[in-house]
Image: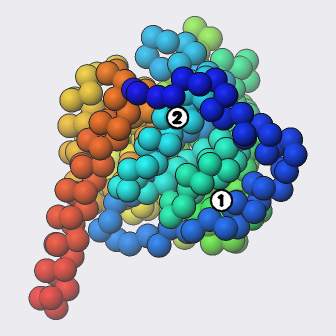
Amino acid sequence: MTADDDPRRYAHLSTIRLEDPDAIARAAKARRRHPGLKYGQQNFIVAADHPARGALAVGNDPVAMADRRQLLDRLQIALANPLVDGVLASPDIMDDLLLLGALDGKLVFGSMNRGGLSGLVNEFDDRFTGHTAAALVALGADGGKMLTRICLGDPDTVATLEATAKAIDSLAERKLIAMVEPFLSVRENGKVRNDLSANAVIKSIAIAEGLGSTSAYTWMKVPVVADMERVMAATTLPTVLLGGDPDSSPDEVFAGWEAALALPGVQGLTVGRTLLYPQDGDVAGAVATAASLLSRTAGSRTETTRIAEASE
């Protein structure tokens, strides 16, 4: 990735935060909103909420996401692609992007629960320490995302499920999308591991889509796993695919996404580390490749819908 290495390139953000903190609210109010969601147009959202949970690793580098300047460089490259529809970010990163003017015309999703820190002794007690529904309204955001890890052997899971249900209701009251990211998870050798078998993902969806008193504004955010046809048969909710931190080659990852994007109900991609920190360092190239998968799939769906409507 070619980037400006001047360590002072984001010094103006610190100055604004010090002298004029209200500039963030003004930037949010002045921001041009996304034109709106439509069936047949899959959405491409870049995720950048990992650091707030202490999850800085990408591949074999345990602190790949630690340099905020580099992260902002990469996010701006990704968001400059007109086929990238929006961002999912924690409040600190979201505020930086607002001050940088990088969110005009984009979908905006806030990260709501970051309390289950990576490696924390009670990691499953994933408290809501980020955006609130009220704050997201003030930002002009489109919704909020919540990580919902379900560990049948950990009593903290119940509190997380209850908090998630309340957050879904709080968002729905304001007509904001609740993007719920469920996993069946276990703790092994002191580390949390998500079960990525198809049956486990299906069960996590079944639990998560029943949270809250309404599902009218709820979306699912699920990993791409084997047997995605069965996974997507588990829900009628709009669903976005997450990228995670895959071990397979980029070609295999993109092929998996392309196949999953062709399934009914898949609304698009919400991907972070895979595209922001690609193996070859070419952020723009990785983003363009992922965007091309959505544009082909979305185009074919739009055409199918048009033909069906014309025949009625």
Q: Is 290 left or right of 251, judged from the image as shown?
A: right
Q: Residue placed at 57% from the left, 15% from the top?
A: 63
SS at circle 1: helix
Q: Residue furthest bottom?
A: 312
Viewer-nearest residue: 200 or 99: 99
Is residue 113 in view? no
Q: Is residue 100 left or right of residue 206?
A: right
Q: At numbered mark 2, what does the secondary structure look like: helix, strand or loop?
A: helix
* Residue drawn where x is 65% and y is 59% of the image: 168
Q: Position of residue 130 (x, y in %)?
A: 73, 44
Image location of residue 147, percent across then percent down = 59, 41
Q: Tell me if label 2 and label 1 are in contact, CB under 8 Å.
A: no
Type of amino acid under label 1: Ile
Quickly name the residue at label 1.
168
- Location of residue 178 by image quarter: bottom right
Give residue 136's mark. Answer: none
Report the residue that reaches farthest toward the top. Answer: 189
Q: Which residue is mark 2?
A: 73
Coordinates of residue 146 in the picture (x, y in percent): 61, 46
Between 118 and 163, the residue placed more toward the observer is: 118
Which of the two labelled residues, at mark 2 and mark 1, occupies the earlier sequence position?
2
Q: Is residue 301 left or right of residue 231?
A: left
Task: Note whether 78 is above or below 86 in the view shown.
Answer: above
Give the residue type that dot 2 points to. Asp
Task: Identify which residue is drawn at 24% across, 49% down.
Answer: 292
